[in-house]
Image (cartoon, grey):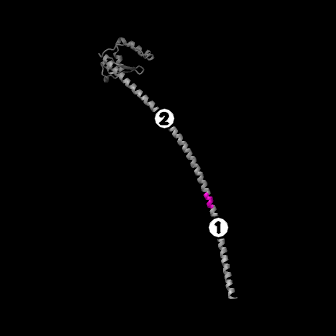
Amino acid sequence: MSTDGVEVQSYLDTIEELTAELAETNRGVVALSLEVEAYREHLEDLVAERTAQLEATQEELQQTNSELLMLTSELDSRIALRTAELTEANAALKHQIEEVDRARSLVRRINERLELATQAAGLGIWEWDVQADLLTWDETTFRLYGEEPADVVNAAELRRERLAPEDRGACDLVVGAPLLADPRFTGEFAVTGRD
């Protein structure tokens, strides 16, 4: 063979080799393209899935936000109503406290006048719980009986002892059921001095 024929054959062999390499490269490119396409589809699926999750989460957040706004509005309304109620109740309570203070002041003035009147008249004031047989005396009553408050253990017993003998029977009758039935009873009984 001639040199030209050898060269042509060499070119043909090289072309054949290059064609085989090119075919192999094409197969690699096709395989790689298929992998890239599969990976792209996988990424698109992931993006679609994440997008759907984000949209669902966003929808839940919007629903939760709407509920929170509604609850906040309801709470604000309830707070405003309760505040108005408490303001009204406080005003009423303040008025009641002022009334109680005025009544206490009036009672204090009446007690002061009563004390002045009883001291000027030399009258003693006492209270008797008939059911408990408990007698409470003021200072003047102790003085009228000639006793010191610290020395008297049982005022009811002392009253019985100091009743005039002629009045003891009548007093015992009054202390029974009639006095319990009508506590407005009035009567006069004489009391004896210390000795």
Direction from residue 186 to residue 15 in the image, left or right? right
Q: Residue 120 or 29: which is nearer the viewer? A: 29
Residue 154 appears in view: no
Q: Residue furthest front?
A: 4
Q: Position of residue 61 (x, y in %)?
A: 56, 49
* Element carrying mark 1: helix
Mark 2 highlights which residue?
84
> Which comes sooner in the sequence, label 1 or label 2?
1
In reply to whether residue 45 is colored magenta, the answer given is yes
* Vertical placement of residue 13 versus 57, above or below: below
* Vertical placement of residue 77 versus 142, above or below: below
Q: Residue 69 or 144: which is nearer the viewer? A: 69
In reply to whether residue 43 is colored magenta, the answer given is yes
Instruction: Look at 55% across and 46% down and name the residue there.
Output: 65
* Vertical placement of residue 63 versus 169, above or below: below
Q: Give the magenta part as a residue range.
A: 42-47
Q: Considering the image in quadrants, where does the N terminus appear?
A: bottom right
Disc 1 packing (10 Å; few <14; some 14–19; many ≥20): few
Q: Quadrant of residue 18?
A: bottom right
Q: Quadrant of residue 103?
A: top left
Instruction: Look at 63% across and 61% down and name the residue there.
Output: 42
Q: Position of residue 152 (x, y in %)?
A: 33, 22
Q: Position of residue 169 (x, y in %)?
A: 39, 12
Mark 1 highlights which residue?
33
Q: Position of residue 151 (x, y in %)?
A: 31, 23
Q: Are marks 1 and 2 in contact (CB under 8 Å)?
A: no
Q: Residue furthest bottom?
A: 2
Instruction: Look at 66% across and 74% down and name the residue there.
Output: 24
